[in-house]
Image (spheres, rainbow, N blue to C red):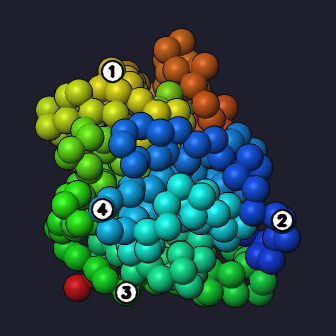
Amino acid sequence: MLRWRNLWLLLGLAMSGGLARAADAGAFFSLHQIGKGIWAAIALPGSHAGSNAGFIIGDDGVLVVDSFEDPAAAQALLKVIREKTPLPLRYVVNTHYHLDHVAGNGVFQAAGAVILAQRNVRAWERTENLKFFGDKITPAQRKTVQSFVLPSVVYRHGMELYLGQRKVVVRVLPGHTGGDSIVVVPDADVVFTGDLFWNHSLPNLIDADTSAQIRSNAVFGHDYPAATFVPGHGQIGHAADVAAFRGYLLALRQAITTAQGQGERGALLQRSVLNRLKDSYGSWNYFDYFAGRNIAQTVAELAGSKRLPLPSP
């Protein structure tokens, strides 16, 4: 498996801990209303938000989706929520365990929220996140990961939550990490996808089962054809954007199998597949950083040699 150090720095992540900044939303994310009482917080490029997040206001409380990679960004989101509604903060749903989606959990827990996630998130949050710092992780970095606030309520397949009369469906789908949830607001046809969908952005595939992720993206198009989708990374999207992302994963796998069928291996295969992908996807976000890694990790996946996190028993 390909190893690298400080993957998230390119995405604006810096898990140094104790970053002292004012809780100013404009430093971290842009805010978009995508339905009645539903807001998407889209991470600004290069900021320490690290990933997208959002919140849903119901009749008697608020649900937050993901908590960014920096507590300062989470504080900024909490401030925005307080400006929008006096209703209590009830839940945070972590869509998966990766540090850019969970590091602000403590901010919302202190404000009264219960942290929810698929059961593997609790098992992996303080263990698997260490790998993003490479073999020379510092004591400060290790301490930061060990301080992450874990979900206190976990589920295997999903759950339904009610904010008064407003129903929110949390649904588990496979693909990105083995512990992925989406958050669906049926009355507004809004879906927060976590990192199962990256909008016109090459994804991090370090834990991915691309075959399962392709199937999950097909589910999005089939079950929520008219939905507004909030991806884990990139701008708010719709069914055509989800289909384009699915197309990338299909093209990646097909290009690898074609190259292998022509006898290409190693560096030759890497160059060949990269050239095939560049024509269609070279303008996507993170292409230069993730394309080579996507190829190497998918080669390992197809060969059955890719290391994946072990699920909770």
In space, the residues marked 1 and 2 are separated at their CA atoms by 38 Å
Q: In which quarter of the image is the C terminus?
A: bottom left
According to the picture, the residue beneath numbered tag 4 turns out to be 59
Q: Which residue is drawn at 39% across and 75% down?
A: 90
Q: Earlier in the sequence, mark 2 or mark 4?
A: 2
Which residue is the extreme one toward the front?
86
- Residue at (55%, 60%) from the top-left corner? 81
Do residues under tags 4 and 1 come within 8 Å of each other at their CB atoms?
A: no
Q: Which mark is residue 21?
A: 2
Q: Mark 1 points at which residue?
A: 240
Amino acid tagged 1: Ala
Label 2 amino acid?
Arg
Determine the secondary structure under disc 4.
loop
Across the whole image, how many numbered discs are drawn on residues? 4
Of the residues under marks 3 and 4, which one precedes in the sequence?
4
Measure how far apart labels 2 and 4 are at the Cα level. 33 Å
Outermost right residue: 20
For residue 152, the mark is: 3
Res. 221 image quadrant: top left
